[in-house]
Amino acid sequence: MEQAKTFDEAILSVEQQRSKKVFLWELGMQVASMGFGEKYTSIDQMWTLQLTFGQLASGAAAQPFKTVADYQNWLKRLDGYLAWLDTAQNRMLEGIAKGYVLPKSLIAKVVPQLAAMTKSPVESHLFYVPIRNLPESFTAAEKKELTTAYAAVIGEKVIPAYKKLHNFMATTYMPKEEKVLV
């Protein structure tokens, strides 16, 4: 941060000066947040991976769902994401023990977000949207294989993982709000 401050603004364009100020501000915010146990508050209502991943899963964001390989790759990514959900919950348990807990008002917004991801039938799940939009160019066999795989992963892994996390957030995490340090 100190090095960035040494750049002579006289040689920077107006746009570069503005970029420098934004960079220094963002860096300052990151440094300041390091002391607040951010790793113990993995899930919130606005900016965390479970929301980004849901957007990607919908097929309406940057994640491509155009080829059979795209669909298969997404299934592989789901395994990594589900591992992240477990890690996030474990970190939040550590946070509870250390007194790093997000305010109840924020978690009260997360709980319904998670509840929405626990719903059945599988065909109504957000992560199933790409199957409802399979390209016409896929063969019947490819469509059947992908549909079966997605239904199994969502029903056997995704929904149970969200149920576990929802239960944790609603019954274990939210009641700990009185110890807020963040």
Image: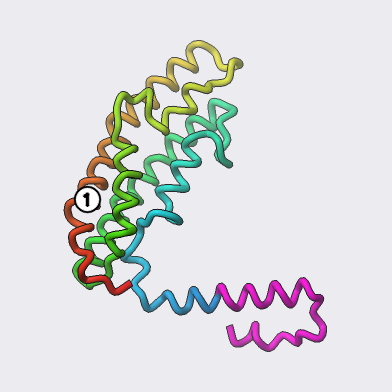
Q: Which residue is mark 1?
A: 170
Nearer-the-camera pick, 67 or 173: 173
Q: Residues within 10 Å of mark 1 (few under 14, many from 20)?
A: some
Q: Quadrant of residue 10?
A: bottom right
Q: Main secondary structure of the magenta part?
A: helix
Residue 27 in the figure: left or right of residue 111: right
Q: Quadrant of residue 15?
A: bottom right
Q: Residue at x 43, y 47 (%)?
A: 51
Q: Check the image and name the residue furthest to the front.
A: 105
Q: Position of residue 36 (x, y in %)?
A: 36, 75
Q: Check the image and name the residue furthest to the top.
A: 140
Span colored in magenta: 1-26
User: Disc 1 on helix, strand or loop?
Assistant: helix
Residue 140 in the figure: left or right of residue 80: right
Q: Residue at x 35, y 59 (%)?
A: 42
Q: Position of residue 155 (x, y in %)?
A: 30, 29
Residue 126 falls within the magenta-colored stretch:
no
What amino acid type is highlighted by mark number 1?
Ala
Q: From the viewer's perspective, is residue 138 above or below residue 21?
A: above
Q: Position of residue 124 (x, y in %)?
A: 38, 25
Nearer-the-camera pick, 109 or 172: 109
Q: From the viewer's perspective, is residue 162 above or below residue 88?
A: above
Instruction: Look at the image and name its color scheme.
Output: rainbow
